[in-house]
Amino acid sequence: MLMEYIICHYAEIGLKGKNRRFFEEKLVENIKKALRPEFFEFVKRISGRLLVKISEKGSGEGKKIAGVLKNVFGIAYFAFAVDCPQKIGEIKKKALEVLKTQKFKTFKIATQRSKKEFLLTSTEINEQVGAEILKKLKKKVDLENPDITLFIEIVEKFAFLYTERIKGQGGLPVNVSGKAVTLLSGGIDSPVAAFLMLKRGVAIIFLHFHAYPYTNKASIEKVQKIVKVLDKFQQGSKLYLAPFAGIQKEILLKTPAKLRVILYRRMMFRIAQEVAKKEKCLAVVTGESIGQVASQTLENIKVIEQVTDLPILRPLLGQDKQEIIKMARQINTFEISILPDQDCCVRFLPKHPTTKANLKEVERAEKNIDIKKLIQMCYNKITKQLC
Ligand code: ATP
Ligand code: MG
């Protein structure tokens, strides 16, 4: 059976008034961006759902299209559907046509009617279409545990029929919640943190600090690959690459070893703030998780974040490493993250990094380096890539 439409449903909780329209419009935009243009004729809002009209070229590409829609945040579930005139006789005919192509013994009809002026109620449609299937196909009704459910949706001028609901990612459409800079290290955690923020509708600009040419390009190649994977959740991702070796050298030469990691992180946040300003981002995202490494104690987190007044979003704060790894595998970043690299911050790591940084002590150490100059030096050499 040729499927002509896709109906996309979203979770409606909290969607009222203007909020709902904004949400729907973003979702339409994101679906259009994600799908190949030759695969659809239009994507539009119809009461409480979105409708995609599949083009002739797209009609044989169901698998590809489903693969793409599964990664569009905001869709709770979607279904490939056929349409027929809004008359009970036509609906019965189409129902027979759809079910004839399927293998099953027991069935159920489930009608949703958002157009209340349709002459029959949902129950009456279920009964009448069900009776027709019983008579013509000699199958059994099972309302509890049917082999197949035929869904009918009466909405605006359409009567849609379909038999399979495909689960989407849920969440909110990317970009309904503004933009944030994610500090992307190439490790396991930060890609997962970016994913979780994307899922809540935050568009992500990626920022990676590297020590090339003092290290090889492995960490850069890794983050490029990671951004490519995450780009399927938000098309057109931007990756900023910031050379960090100059800053590290100054910190290494002029400040106490035990404060190194804290000072690196403070510099990263300062530069992230500059990128955020340029990209009109409202927050910074990191992959930090409490206590995972020495720099991630509450004391250190507090001292590190003093340098910026942007909110720092840390979606993994309360997650165990194993939970993070599980998510990283699900989103296909894990295998890239575990490739060997030369992380800029692992170079010259002190034997005893402080776990209880003291702000005064840190500020005193920073007096030995020219913060403004170092930020400028790094920022001027930042490169931007579209992935
Ligand atoms: P990850 O697995 O994300 O690297 P981690 O457990 O190794 O995290 P840290 O090395 O302390 O933890 O880094 C904490 C966070 O700081 C990272 O999640 C990331 O957001 C940021 N970060 C660390 N190194 C870099 C880097 N080279 N470039 C950009 N961000 C970084
Ligand atoms: Mg790391």
Image (tube, rainbow, N blue to C red):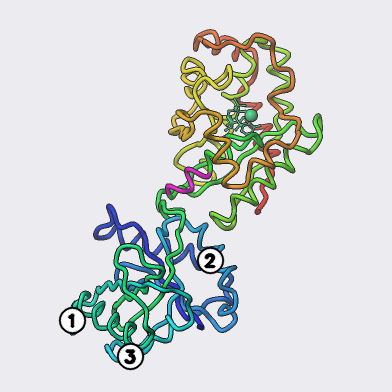
227 is higher (above) or lower (below) than 308: below
323 is higher (above) or lower (below) than 171: above
Looking at the rendered structure, which numbered label has been put on residue 35?
none
Residue at 42% x, 80% y: name it: 99
Label 1, secondary structure: give it. Answer: loop
Amino acid at pointer 1: Glu
Instruction: Check disc 3: other Cα within 10 Å, few if <14, some if 14-19, many if 20+.
Output: some
Q: Which residues are magenta?
A: 195-200
Q: Across the whole image, how many numbered discs are drawn on residues?
A: 3
In the rendered image, residue 124 lying in the magenta stretch gets the answer no
Residue named by callout 1:
117
Residue named by callout 2:
66
Amino acid at pointer 3: Glu
Question: Pointers 1 and 2 in contact (CB under 8 A)?
Answer: no
Q: Earlier in the sequence, mark 1 or mark 2?
A: 2
The kind of secondary structure the magenta stretch mainly shows is helix
Left or right of 126: which side holds 76? right
Q: Quadrant of the C terminus?
A: bottom right
Q: Residue furthest bottom?
A: 89
Examine the image and state in which quarter residue 77 appears: bottom left
Ligand 1's quadrant: top right
Examine the image and state in which quarter residue 365 appears: top right
Residue at 48% x, 81% y: name it: 4
Left or right of 225: which side holds 6? left
Residue named by callout 3:
90
Q: Earlier in the sequence, mark 3 or mark 2?
A: 2
